[in-house]
Image (cartoon, helix red, strand yellow):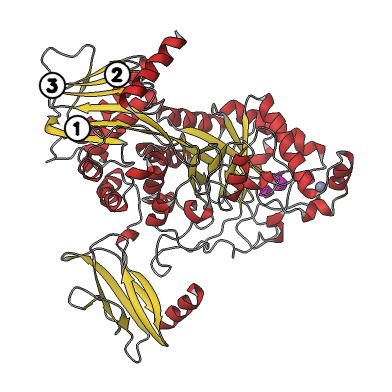
Amino acid sequence: MRQKVVSLGLFLLASFSSAASDKNGFIFWQLPPQINTIGKEGQEHLSIIPAPVAIQLREGVFKFDSTVVIVPSGNGEVQKLAGYLSDKVFTPSGIRLTVAKPARAGGKSIKLVLNKVFSKIIGDEGYQLEITPAAVNISANKPAGLFYGIQSIIQMLPPAIESKVRTGGEIWELRAASVTDYPRFGWRGLMLDVSRHFFNKEEVKSYIDQMAKYKLNSFHWHLTDNQGWRIEIKKLPGLTATGAFRVPRTGTFWTFEPPHPDEKATDGGFYTQDDIREIVQYARERYVTIVPEIDVPGHSLAFIASFPQASCTQLPYHVNPGSPHADEDLVLCAGNEDNFKKLEIILSEVSSLFPGKYIHIGGDEADKRFWKSCVKCQARIAKEKLKDEAGLQSYFIKRLEKILHSNGKKLIGWDEILEGGLAPDASVMSWRGSEGGIAASKMGHHVVMSPGQYCYFDHLQGDINIEPTYAGGGVLRLSDVYRYDPVPPEGGPGYILGAQANVWTEHIPTIRQVEYMTWPRALALSEVVWTPPDSRNIDSFLLRVESQFPRFSNAEVNYAPSIYDPIIVPQKDGKKLLISFKTEYRGLDIYYTFDHTFPDKFSDKYQGPIEIPKGASEIWAITYKGKMPAGRLLKVAIDDLEKRLQELI
Ligand SMILES: [Zn+2]
């Protein structure tokens, strides 16, 4: 039976595609030209993000009306997907698509077909979509593929499809087309930090729902850090009783006052194990795997606050509310056997809650100074014949790997786990650039790329004078994310599982702001990890991003409109300072003033580098799309421009 399936797969490969291996040894499946005839034009017509692998537009439309029947064929999971699509269409349109088997004679149908077309090309997550005026056929090897086919047709429907209430005046139809689609990478992730700020169960579910619409499939949940322990551990209730709460502070994180003596820790929260199970199930229904992170031995102050014996100093500490503390750098004592006993309990409970293969153990930024001056840690180094503190870090991680293996899980950690020698079966998440990832992949370890330069969504999306918070780390625009390629130019063996973006939340106190920082940049990430690199096109992408904005509004999801804002570029002509402008979104007009008046389309229009009039102290600029303002007002002091220029040099 196995032989037969393989033969059929090979037959399909030989018939419909050619396999090509690039210089790095990565395999890309290329569809023949007759299928992939309409690249950019097809992308824009269907406006799907991430752009599908191959689109062929056809004549006519498939109209939704109450005669349409959804016909699921396959297991009960396909039946559920049919119900999901029916509900999604019903809410805004009032059209109830009946789920039935078989289709009515002569009626229109949407068929969800599982396992009918075995295609190795499309893999476990790909799908084939055929839309004609009479029928929609989505076929896939696995239910995940059907789910993604459904997401594509949802994006082809009017933006009102995302509305939570009944709308009027929409034309509910799909353009006839043929789509073949499958992802470039299997790990397409977003990380949310719920420690620095806590987001409740419903907020996390809505975040997962939104990412699944764009075929992102891995939710990395940063559950513990110095600012809060967010997961109930039944056998260690102290972790959440103490570790989940800190004193309330508002303003700018890292400047907050430390707790006053006897001040109550009232800010925070945690997920009960029932909450976790509910969220895991919710994610599973959207084909999202959750990767929980328990960050040790650094970033462990919430653990240490709960168990004062846990650190090398053995002194009592508070959960850090966002203060510039020296204790921010505290680490778990690697010489204290009780810490490993507790970690065994924690990782065993965590493993039983999350069905995914990976558990993330952090491993980042563990300050070795405490280990250097700790008697217990030094005794451990001597007893285990370790070289130094880096060796102790490696020992620590290897012990955690053993615990995870005994629970049937695999260990993944930030790239610092390479220090002192990588655990035998560990996977690496590369955040300090791509180097750690490249090094690990050369050693035969699996890698998820997440370099700060392209994947840190706590960074600003535009000018610091417009964007609402400043997290440091510079500017990461939508187009920067879009340019990213997880496969480094210097190559390496094919151990790269994919990429993910990280939303660190020190400066992000609300879920609305989390959404603002995530969208639309996660759209760029989704296309980076799904669409073949040759099919990516920034102009097509920006138009498709714009078409998502009304969908975000209907779904009540916040987003950053930064692509419309003016980008100011100072430059020097000899000693003279000149100002240039550009925008990410193409074709906008830019108007500016130097006299502290609000610019509009009757102000000076930007046509090329501007000389600064004598005495001017600020420039104000705004963009227009035709007759309407597009972006937000940018005000920059001329002195500030001089400083920015120095930084550029
Ligand atoms: Zn120690």
- Which labelled disc corresponds to residue 612? none
Q: Nearer the viewer, mark 1 or mark 3?
A: 1
**Label 1 element class:** strand
Instruction: Give the class, few, some or many, for how many residues have Cα within 10 Å of label 2's Cα (few <14, many ≥20).
Output: many
Along the line of sight, the residue nearer the viewer: 197 or 574: 574
Q: Which residues are magenta?
A: 299-309
**Label 3 element class:** loop
**Label 2 element class:** strand
Label 3 sits on what residue type? Thr
First in sequence, mark 3 or 2: give its number.
3
Q: Residue 373 colored magenta?
A: no
Using the rendered view, name the quadrant where residue 624 is placed.
bottom left
Using the rendered view, name the quadrant where residue 334 is placed.
top right
Using the rendered view, name the quadrant where residue 360 is placed.
top right
Q: Which residue is mark 1?
A: 177
Residue 125, x across and y down, in percent: 39, 28
Q: Nearer the viewer, mark 3 or mark 2?
A: 2
Image vertical order of residue 375 relative to residue 404, above or below: below
Q: Which residue is mark 2?
A: 113
Label 2 sits on what residue type? Val
